[in-house]
Image: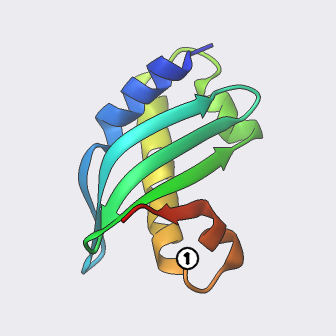
Amino acid sequence: MATAEQVREALKRKLSGRQSQGSATSLEVLEVKVPSVFPELLLKIQVRVSGQLWEVSLDYQRDEASLVSGDLAEDTLDYLGFLVRTHLFEWWHTKDTERFSARMGKRLD
């Protein structure tokens, strides 16, 4: 099983920097923290979006958490990076209208 530090370093490589989706929205991943890898994968990701600084908590269980239960193969990391990016953009677009999404993020500035 991968350690929290191994997962953090791998995700940091995959996610760091500016990410774009569609037309206008882009976010920049500044920091990745991994408080837990088993039995749930818990991520705390610091992002800058539209000039705002946020920390977003993503909690993965079952199938998604099992992605880090073995070796951190490159294709697995690519998929996990894609999953995390997708959830960050979903959070951003729904945080003002969905109660669950609103609880995932904490504004830092």
Query: Quadrant of the rendered structure where residue 31 is?
Result: top left
Task: Residue 29 in the image: state x and y as whole percent.
Answer: 32, 50
Q: Residue at x 52, y 45 (%)?
A: 44
Q: In this view of the protein, which residue sits in the foreground, 45 or 41?
A: 45
Q: In this view of the protein, which residue sits in the foreground, 73 or 65?
A: 65
**Which image quadrant: the N terminus?**
top right
Q: How is the image coloured?
A: rainbow
Residue holding disc 1? 95
Q: Residue at x 55, y 76 (%)?
A: 95
Q: Secondary structure at mark 1?
A: loop
Query: Quadrant of the rendered structure where residue 99 is?
Result: bottom right
Query: Quadrant of the rendered structure where residue 109 is?
Result: bottom left
**Vertical relation: 107 (above or below) 56:** below
Q: Is residue 65 left or right of residue 91?
A: right
**Vertical relation: 87 (above or below) 51:** above
Which amino acid, mark 1?
Answer: Lys
Q: Is residue 66 left or right of residue 88?
A: right
> How many numbered markers are drawn?
1
Task: Residue 36 in the image: state x and y as whole percent.
Answer: 64, 29
